[in-house]
Image (cartoon, rainbow, N blue to C red):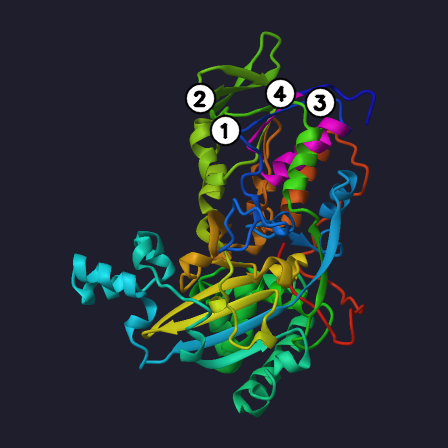
Amino acid sequence: MSQNQETKRIAIVGSDLSGLFCAWALSHHSKHNVTVFEKSEQVLKSISTIDFLPPGIPENCSLDFLPETYVPVDIKPFYFTNSLSPNLSNILNELRVELKQTLINFGFSGWILNNEVSNDSFQSSETKKHLNETQSIENELASTQNFIEDAENIPKNTRKIIKNNSLLPKRAIWIEWSSSSLTGLFNGIKNFLDIKFWRALLDFYRLSLEVRKESLDSLSSKKNSLPIKLYLENKGYSTSFMEIFMFPIIHCGTNNTDMNKAKQIPTWIAKCIFRRYLDHSMGPFFNKKINVVKGGTSKLITSLKECLLDIKYKTEITRVYKSQTENNSNQVILVDNNGSLHNFDVVIFAINPKKISKILGNELTTKQNDILKSISFTRDRYVLHSDSVLLPSNPSTWSTINSIQSTLQNKKASCVTIWGNKLLDIDINQHGSIFVSINPTISPSPRTIVTERYYNQLDLSTKKLKLLDLSTELNSESIKFVGSSYSFNTLECGCYSGLKVAESLGAQLPFDLVIPEIFPKTVDKTVTSNIPNRIFMWF
């Protein structure tokens, strides 16, 4: 760090990952004094690690094997690759966070519940008895169609009880595939005999050639601002390609669990996703090595807390305004929930952009206000459970990330299920099945649910290429903004955002800061295993 650097008092409002990385860089690689304000009792509330115990085993069980049965599991999975996340990789190395490598691949399952299956299939005898005592069966059965939009309003004693995947034999599977192998891609030989699947594969390679000719500059053309569904229709791509490959890839690539919204995403974003997917091959195969935090991301939280000396918990900042001292130097005044005033030279916001306008008020320009209002989010429900009903019916096509599209009584719904055993390399025989379903279309059996959380997810459907990094349009000399939501809501983008602001304030990082590559310019020729492999790592 420069010996001539002026020491500043810097406040960081909020404790998301980008804010804490910024605080780490300023605390350890500059002369500045840094204070983090967090309104809750803990930092990084978006990261939650629990000690997973398979459902059905009493917590007070005294069996000898029980201590080995517990295993740390992240409710919101945290994973990355060194090639796509160089800044995150470097900072975790500096923090000495222990990592382990696992494999990740992708799968898709589309199914329809047979019409002959009655509503009674969703209810236990105890539930039926309760329904008869309370209200008419017809009305209650209607209320138990447990789609995500009304899942929270259904009493637990009327939720669908699905034991041992009892719905699987009653589902009509129209397509299933996995990127892990040739056998998985063709689902044995089922897809091999399907002419629509072959047409979808031909269009897959056709779009591969088209996307490889694109550049980041060419993505700004008018045609690439169209919704991806309209773009593909105009170019003559088949419906089978869209439904079997393109939309499921976007579905998981953006973590957008609304398939209809995935179809409306701007073409330039869809092409970025598809290009990253193709980084290793021209085909749909990928089986990529990734990094996860050994022992869960709570280890990362511990490492960050040990590095930061001044964190004020239970201190919510309600107002921020600029002021001048007697010698005409600028200051930023922070007002907390107790009415106390805090004077700083610079304030950095690391909270949800939707909350900033109220805090800054008239300190924001009209342009800044418009940018903050343009950022929108969805609210996603993450359910940690052990029910395989939200996985493909064929276990050989189970993948690390599974896009599920289901049709129940003529209603389409979609969700993403992450197979925790494969993602975290956890022995299924010792610890049982571990799944995380995002906005589950069918509620897992209550007996298999361990816990659930809600997280905000950036809505990319309105993202503009010319405003790829919104923070550059927002930052001023004394008020700055960090966070992944100003870019692509990825771990790497969030990391870069925090470190970039720290560097602009004089932090001398121990590694070179790398601009995240949104649209790869070259193709990585390396492969793992004998299959051309590539997964789009949207983090």
Q: Quadrant of residue 131?
A: bottom left
Q: What residue is drawn where x is 57% and y is 16%?
A: 343
Q: What residue is drawn where x is 48% and y is 31%?
A: 364
**Camera-nearest label, 3 or 1:** 1
**Camera-nearest label, 4 or 2:** 2
In the picture, the disc for residue 39 is 1
Q: Kindly identify which residue carries mark 3.
A: 32
Q: CA distance from mark 3 to mark 1?
A: 23 Å
Q: What amino acid is labelled 3 in the image?
A: His
The reply to whether the C-beta atoms of the residues labelled 4 and 2 are less than 8 Å apart is no
**Image spot of residue 514 (x, y percent):** 75, 47
Whether residue 224 is visible here, answered yes or no, is no
The reply to whether the C-beta atoms of the residues labelled 3 and 4 are less than 8 Å apart is no
**Image spot of residue 66 (x, y percent):** 60, 50
Q: Would you say residue 246 sits in the magenta stretch? A: no
Q: In this view of the protein, which residue sits in the foreground, 496 or 169?
A: 169
As helix, strand or loop, the secondary structure at mark 4 comes to loop
The reply to whether the C-beta atoms of the residues labelled 2 and 1 are less than 8 Å apart is yes
Crowdedness of circle 1 by 10 Å Cα count: few (<14), some, many (20+)? some
Q: Quadrant of residue 465?
A: bottom right
Magenta residues, start to end: 9-28
In the picture, the disc for residue 337 is 2
Q: CA distance from mark 4 to mark 1?
A: 21 Å
Of pointers 4 and 2, the one earlier in the residue sequence: 2
Position of residue 288 relative to residue 313, above or below, is below
In the picture, the disc for residue 237 is none
Quadrant, the N terminus? top right
Q: Kindly identify which residue carries mark 4.
A: 345
Q: Quadrant of residue 358?
A: top left
Quadrant, the C terminus? bottom right
